[in-house]
């Protein structure tokens, strides 16, 4: 299968655990546990063979720190596309942001917030995925939860029920 016909990979990730309080919600930093969990998430993705060529990350401090720790855990060196809109995006708006990802991107990681990320994972699920992973996805979307999808369409054509769940994991480090 050529790289043009191979399915794209989409990883949806909820940020890791943050401290309880800060001057504003957007500037809340990761807790010590959150840093460990995010690094563990990166290690898990690397073990699965995920190597993103694009990252769409909410501009909130805890999500950018989650991305940084995921990269450290995985051994990736990829600058994130920090998006202010993803911070407050609902499910439809988040899906629209994914649809704007450049067509040449083959492996995308999105790091955002709940309830949006968990809701988007459920909306994209085509029902044909790994049964254990789908069952785990139904169990909720706590901090450091990740879902890996195969996507057979272009990003611009991504729609509800159009991605296949390959794996789901809640990282704890």
Image (cartoon, rainbow, N blue to C red):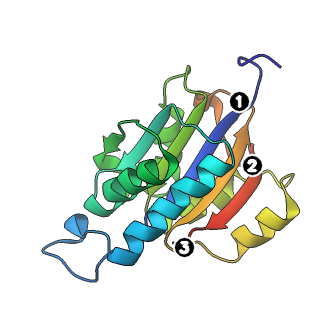
**Percent of width and height locating residue 123:** 67, 56
Query: Do the residues bearing badges 3 and 1 touch, measured as CB atoms within 8 Å?
Result: no
Q: Position of residue 156 (x, y in %)?
A: 58, 29
Which residue is at a point 76% across and 25% down the rendered structure image? 6
Q: Residues within 10 Å of mark 1 (few under 14, many from 20)?
A: some
Labels 2 & 1 near each other (Cβ < 8 A): no
Q: Quadrant of residue 55?
A: top left
Q: Residues within 10 Å of mark 2 (few under 14, many from 20)?
A: some
Mark 3 / mark 1, whichever is N-terminal: 1
Mark 2 or mark 1: whose residue is earlier in sequence? 1
Q: Local crowd at mark 3 within 10 Å, few (<14), some, or many (≥20)? A: some
Report the Cα–Cα distance between label 2 and label 1.
12 Å
Callout 3: SS: loop
The mark closer to the camera, 2 or 3, is 3
At a point 48% along the width and 69% down the height, the residue shown is 37
Task: Identify which residue is drawn at 28% across, 83% down.
Answer: 20
Query: Depth-wise, is mark 2 or mark 1 nearer the camera?
Result: 1
- Sequence-wise first label, 2 or 3: 2
Residue 9 appears at what percent x and percent y? 66, 38
Q: Is residue 36 left or right of residue 1?
A: left
Against 18, is 113 above or below?
above
Depicted 72 relative to depicted 99: above or below: below
Residue bearing mark 2: 161
In the figure, 146 relative to 93: above or below? below
The residue indicated by pointer 3 is 172
> Marks 2 and 3: CB-CB under 8 Å?
no
Residue situated in front as seen by the camera: 14 or 120: 14
Q: Is residue 87 visible?
A: no
């Amino acid at each position: 299968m050529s790289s043009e016909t191979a399915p794209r990979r989409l990883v949806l990730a909820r940020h890791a655990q943050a401290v309880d309080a800060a001057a504003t919600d957007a500037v809340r930093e990761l807790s010590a546990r959150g840093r460990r969990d995010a690094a563990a998430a990166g290690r898990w993705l690397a073990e699965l063979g995920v190597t993103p060529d694009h990252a769409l990350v909410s501009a909130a401090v805890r999500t950018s720190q989650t991305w940084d720790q995921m990269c450290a855990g995985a051994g990736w060196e990829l600058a994130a596309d920090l998006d202010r809109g993803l911070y407050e995006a609902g499910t439809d708006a988040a899906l629209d942001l994914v649809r704007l990802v450049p067509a040449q991107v083959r492996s995308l990681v999105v790091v955002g917030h709940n309830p949006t990320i968990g809701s988007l994972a459920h909306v994209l699920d085509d029902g044909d995925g790994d049964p254990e992973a789908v069952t785990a996805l139904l169990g909720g979307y706590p901090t450091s939860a990740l879902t890996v999808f195969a996507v057979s369409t272009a990003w611009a054509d991504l729609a509800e029920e159009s991605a296949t769940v390959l794996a789901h994991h809640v990282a704890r480090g």
